[in-house]
Amino acid sequence: MPPVDGYTERRRTVASGLAGRKLDAMLIAFSPNLRYLTGFTGSNGSLLLLPDDAILFTDPRYQIQARQEVNCRVRIAKGALLLDVAAAIGKLRLRRIGYEPSRMTCDFFNSLTARLPLKTSLEAVSGWIEELRMIKSPPEQQLIRRSVETNSRAFDQAVARARAGMKEQDLAAELEYRMRRLGAEKPAFETIVAAGARSALPHAQPTRARMEAGGLVVVDMGAMQDGYCSDMTRMLFLGTPPAKVKRTYRAVLEAQLAAIDTVRPGVSTAQVDRQARRVLKSYGLDRAFVHSTGHGLGLEIHEPPRIGKRDKSRLKAGMTVTIEPGVYLEGFGGIRIEDTVVVTETGCEILTPTSKELREI
Amino acid sequence: MPPVDGYTERRRTVASGLAGRKLDAMLIAFSPNLRYLTGFTGSNGSLLLLPDDAILFTDPRYQIQARQEVNCRVRIAKGALLLDVAAAIGKLRLRRIGYEPSRMTCDFFNSLTARLPLKTSLEAVSGWIEELRMIKSPPEQQLIRRSVETNSRAFDQAVARARAGMKEQDLAAELEYRMRRLGAEKPAFETIVAAGARSALPHAQPTRARMEAGGLVVVDMGAMQDGYCSDMTRMLFLGTPPAKVKRTYRAVLEAQLAAIDTVRPGVSTAQVDRQARRVLKSYGLDRAFVHSTGHGLGLEIHEPPRIGKRDKSRLKAGMTVTIEPGVYLEGFGGIRIEDTVVVTETGCEILTPTSKELREI
């Protein structure tokens, strides 16, 4: 018998849930779910998970890599993976196959269905693996902690070089260079550096625009290290911030701290979101807060639970989430403050070590 | 009347093709297609394209940005975009809506279908926008050329610092930092730096492994600049290459040059692929060439046409493609050489200016 490792154990958890869902197998092709269940990091793979077996299908580019990374059976497909997957389903006489409807394209579904025996059906199973992924094991928490630390160190190193006149994209380049040198594979998402009025765009891409004296700069960055994400937003001000900037900054910080303060097992994510909104409302800023308060993160930068107005999930120990209220005022700019936190048995721990003072440059 | 710009013209091309496909509208949500038709660079959008109108749906995060980037109507959705899209389809009494089955998830399709009037249907339309995107206009070619030049300059600058003992991921970090400083938004894909035996993994991610003297290093990198991709692979050797490396390198180079030599309008992509394989076969290396010879690139790093054994497309002037044969020998390593070329009226132009000598470090 092979030793029980993380991947084998996770596959066993899913395998043991098949019968209860009346499934003969589960088909998983979404890359983060695949990595969670097998360790495979290639970009093209499908896992057919059976009650007592698992087969990973991939293409010849990943032949050597799959054998190194994966401890279940591997089949190298010569053509489209779905042909081999369909053939295996037929040969194994499987009848009810679970699939991930929010991860599979209509094309893949239709092509696979067309190749299955008449009595075989694909059954939509939503969010099963994502639900397992929500609770991070201690080794996963450790990886996220490391990713957060890399990210914060990269921020410190790069911001030490920031100055008025620097292009947004040059600061972004510096931030990403530093995180890679500190051990990250890549940024977890496109680093945001947005200066002046552009800071009012919540998802601004860095441009050739220069950061001007007397202006705000939002820096929203995350690392991906050993597959796990971090996420942090901090604000810089080039010069001495005027009263309105300071006031708005304090309001957002108060909202962020209040939201963090509510994080503990059993609390609904809507309640955390409400807390941030309540504080911003007391400053007349609630309408300028145009997104949700946070999101889970792990193998993906955005994963369940979402922390928004309409969300019904409840926090549990082991979840890792961001808390990131922000306000966006056209013409004035935007201010957002974001940490990565882990839900503990009694509350939460803020993983992000970076100071939350408005950083004057 | 608004002035005719690239985006309006492109939308008119699609709009004028609706009637022939018996469609009342086309729904486009795939980000590169959306960008091609509107200029919108946000991550969440759906375009409803009508014979004489176009509406872009996005969420509040992109409210300001969409107004800056897009010259058609913009609607900001409060909840899931598909609710607003469904409502608009109902209100406009549209009956047959084209959708992109290889880009839409089963979930989106099912949720949208459930919200449409009974007499309204979604009709699969595959690869229409991608087909338009295959032929690059002169301004697009110019953008790709710039992206290629940035990429090659970044290679030169970073490789000047490469030395034995350096970690794969540190060279990757340097390459990406240089491309960003030279004007790229980001790498077009995860930069590959794979040393020694790891060079035999066609899609290796850079690791903490050090590049050792007496070993091969494959560098496969691309920039994304103003939305357009470049792609290049070059080989380094740390020291003086032994005869087998030189011999294998020459075989791959001969295959690459022979394939490039066949590129001209009217030639099938399978023929280009065959040419590379023919040369490698003469060296007994054809079985070590485990992927296709190349692919189109533009707003995406991989887009039609594919240049592989089973592909039936024919080259046309204005297409931009990679030519990248490679051989992978477990234990020995891998060798790949890749350029970005544009198909001209009479043949092709190699855009990549970097020397194709095996680079000794």
Image: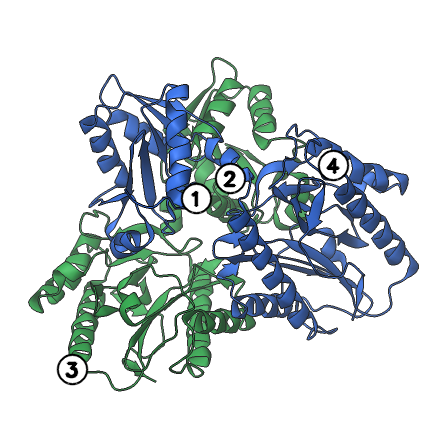
Chain colours: A green, B blue
Q: From mark 4 to mark 3, how far is it between C-alphas?
A: 65 Å
Left or right of residue A45: residue A130? left
Which element is circle 1 on?
helix
Q: Position of residue B177 (x, y in %)?
A: 55, 69
Q: From mark 1 to mark 4, how far is it between C-alphas?
A: 28 Å
In the drawing, what numbered circle is on residue B36? Answer: 1
Which element is circle 2 on?
helix
Q: Amino acid at mark 1?
A: Tyr
Tell me which numbered mark, 1 or 2, is placed earlier along the sequence.
1
Observer-nearest of A30 and A89:
A30
Q: Quadrant of residue A169?
A: bottom left
Observer-nearest of B171 and A34:
B171
Name of the residue lying farthest toward the top: A118
Looking at the rendered image, the quarter that the C terminus of chain A falls into is bottom left
Work out whether A211 lies above or below B318: below
Q: Residue at x 69, y 49 (%)?
A: B349
Q: Residue at x 17, y 63 (%)?
A: A276
In the drawing, what numbered circle is on residue A96? Answer: none
Q: Are marks 4 and 3 on the same chain?
A: no
Q: From mark 2 to mark 4, how far is it between C-alphas?
A: 21 Å
Q: Residues within 10 Å of mark 1 (few under 14, many from 20)?
A: many
Q: Position of residue A332 (x, y in %)?
A: 21, 70
In the drawing, what numbered circle is on residue A243? Answer: 3
- For label 4, the residue is B272
> Could you tell me if the residues under marks 1 and 2 are in contact, i.e. CB atoms within 8 Å?
yes
